[in-house]
Image (cartoon, rainbow, N blue to C red):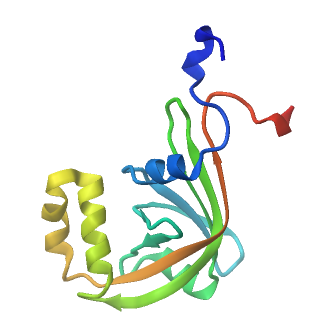
Amino acid sequence: MPESESWRGKIGRMSQEEMDAFLAGPRLMRMACLKDDGKPYIVPMWYEWDGEGFWVIPREKSFWAKCLVKQKYCAATIDEEQPPLRKVLVEGEAELIEEPNVGGKWVAIATRMSVRYFGEHGPDYLQPTLVDPRWLFRIKPSQITTWQGVAWAKRYR
């Protein structure tokens, strides 16, 4: 790439290492699930990527948790709004790990998430809410598509 176009960043699919590093950042996942009427429902959320799947922790009364229980198929995007415009697109299935509870496996994951999203004050945010029941789901991707850089993929030309 000519020096004059360096602003475009690295263009193309992300490597596994690039994707893992990108997903380790404090970005929001926007997940789509299906309502009973078949229409999509999209919600932004925290997540944790474990190298193979995504952990998500809805509150007990989260509408989207009930959607995932009824219809496990979902899709998501994790992206950024400024160059290099990286994005990860996910299709997959949600596996219910825990129904709403206090003190379950979700606590350790939520603790890591709180630090990732709020830094040293993450536990200050999380601690007072640990009495509120939460679900635990793991999103198992069936397909992951990545892209980075300011350019169109060749398939669009």
Provide residue 138's location: percent of width, then percent of height. 49, 77
Residue 114 percent across, percent down from the top left: 26, 62
Residue 133 seen in the figure: yes
Q: Quadrant of residue 2?
A: top right
98 vs 33, nearest the viewer: 98
Which residue is at 48% across, 54% downward? 20
| Observer-nearest of 8 and 130 | 8
User: Seen from this angle, which residue lies furthest top?
Assistant: 4
Q: Could you tell me which residue is drawn at 25 percent across and 88 percent down?
A: 102
Q: Quadrant of the C terminus?
A: top right
Left or right of 98: which side holds 78?
A: right
Q: Is residue 34 visible?
A: no
Image point (50%, 41%), residue name: 80
- Tell me what residue is drawn at x 20 percent, y 74 percent: 129
Count of residue discs: 0
- Relative to 126, is 72 on the left or the right? right
Would you place residue 97 above or below residue 55 in this image?
A: below
Q: Quadrant of residue 48?
A: bottom left
Q: Decide which of 144, 137 is in the foreground and name it.
A: 144
Whether 34 is drawn above or below 115: the answer is below
Residue 14: give x, y in percent of width and height: 60, 45
In the figure, is residue 50 to the left or right of 155? Answer: left
Task: Report the side of 22 relative to 35 (left or right).
Answer: left
Q: Which corner quadrant holds the N terminus?
A: top right
Relative to 37, residue 157 above or below: above
In x, y percent, where is residue 147? Answer: 64, 42
